[in-house]
Amino acid sequence: MISKKHKQTLLLLKNNFPQFEQLLEEIYPNDQLLREISNEFYEINKRIEMNVNASLKTSEAYIETINELKEELSDYLSNLKKEMQNQ
């Protein structure tokens, strides 16, 4: 029986190598070398995915902060301009 991780790895392989889907189905369960290489492929893909997700979250946080600072600067400059016009 194939573990959940092996199923996910096999799915990743099929998605990346659709022309070998049938072959992968047949040889994956019994080919140790294929499973080892595939496991590395899966792990690296997961790390990349995690890094991209973390980067997106960080970027979103920066964008939110920039927008808040922009609004704060705009309010400050607007108030300063009004004060200068009233003098």
Image (spheres, rainbow, N blue to C red):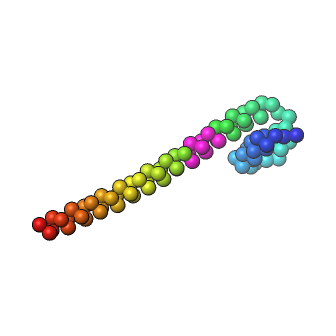
- Left or right of residue 5: residue 74: left
Q: Which one is in front, 27 or 69?
A: 69
Q: Which one is in front, 83 or 69?
A: 83
Quadrant in which the C terminus appears = bottom left
Q: Which one is in front, 68 or 9?
A: 68
Rendering coords of residue 57 (x, y %) = 52, 50
Q: Is residue 13 magenta?
A: no
Rendering coords of residue 24 (x, y %) = 80, 42
- Point 69% across, 39% down: residue: 42
- Secondary structure mostly seen in magenta is helix
- Point 38% across, 57% down: residue: 68
In which image quadrant can residue 44 be found? top right
- Point 77% across, 34% down: residue: 35
Q: Which residues are magenta?
A: 46-53
Rendering coords of residue 80 (x, y %) = 21, 62
Q: Is residue 22 above or below residue 34?
A: below
Q: Is residue 31 above or below residue 65?
A: above
- Work out whether residue 20 can be spotted: no
Rendering coords of residue 69 (x, y %) = 35, 55
